[in-house]
Amino acid sequence: MNWTSLDEFLYMGGYGLYVWGSYAATLVVMSVEAVLVRKRLQAAVGALGNSEASG
Amino acid sequence: MNLRPNTFAAPSRFYAMAGTLTPWFWAAALLFGLTGLYVGFAIAPTDFQQGDAYRIIFIHVPAAWMSMLIYLVLAFWAAWGWMLNARMASMYARALAPTGALFTFIALWTGALWGKPTWGTWWVWDARLTSEFILLLMYLGYIALTEAIDDPRRAANAGALLALVGVVNIPIIYFSVRWWNTLHQGATISMTAAPKMVSTMLTAMLLMTFCFWSYSFAVVFTRARAIVLEQESDNEWVKGLER
């Protein structure tokens, strides 16, 4: 183990802002993309019933 | 099913195949990610020069690699769809673009956060950073262009032309640190020599690369399935899904 406490781990040798800023942004971006893409597929599946009615 | 090279050229078969495989790609992404992060933080040592700031590498390099790889794959399928009039290929190219753009953004963002403490600046207009930024603009341009044209085939073909024109940027990004005097460091990993990197750091970086690669398949397959339903809604097999 490289760190002896959670505080040390978050401090990241003084670089906490940069390291966690990177990981947080990445996690947010990937999570949002995953959610949005799933919503898009659900919307597309949901729209299947409507094409019959209008077509 | 008799598997042939063009089996999944049919949107219906791609839709089914992608639906089956996607959960496995999510599982793989999770597994590789957790393992990679464990190796990267618990096992890989602190860097002699950069301290713990270097740990951004476990995101930055995989994201940059994905940003370039996805663009090449996008251009390939876009060209394929254009030249062979293959709908699924064109749909797949459009599915790839947002993911590629996001990885490009992540590479640029994490690069800036890494550069500030180590180089003293968030940004320079050196060859590597500039060309990666141009890659982001290419992705956004491709998305904007294909979204702006209503007819799917025209949109796909116009996009293919744009994507192909932009392919030249990829070798420029890759060789930028060799061709120009850049602030960005030179290649640590090459195809002709041993990596100049501590093996635990390299392992973590490669695990994160597989994580991003699996994640890409999962989201791109899901988006491609949505695009298939959106564009193929008049076809019988899609109507058969309504149940």
Image (tube, coloured by chain):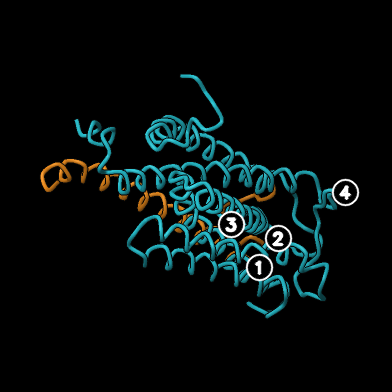
Chain colours: A orange, B cyan
Callout in the foreground (3, 2): 3
Labels 3 and 2 in the same subunit: yes
Query: What label does residue B71 carry, if any?
Result: 3
Please identify the quadrant where the C terminus of chain B is shown.
Answer: top left
Question: In the rendered image, which residue does mark 2 sit on?
Answer: B54
Labels 3 and 1 in the same subunit: yes
Amino acid tagged 2:
Tyr
Callout in the foreground (3, 1): 3
Amino acid tagged 1:
Trp
Callout in the foreground (4, 1): 4
Amino acid tagged 4:
Thr
> Is A49 in front, or is B21?
A49
Question: In the rendered image, which residue does mark 4 sit on?
Answer: B192
Q: CA distance from mark 3 to mark 1?
A: 24 Å
Tell whether label 1 touches label 3 (CB within 8 Å). no
Q: Earlier in the sequence, mark 3 or mark 4?
A: 3
In the image, B217: left or right of B187? left
Circle 1 residues within 10 Å: few <14, some 14–19, many ≥20: many
> Is B8 in front, or is A5?
B8
Helix, strand or loop at disc 4? loop
Labels 2 and 4 in the same subunit: yes
Residue B90 image point, x, y percent: 46, 50
Callout in the foreground (2, 4): 4
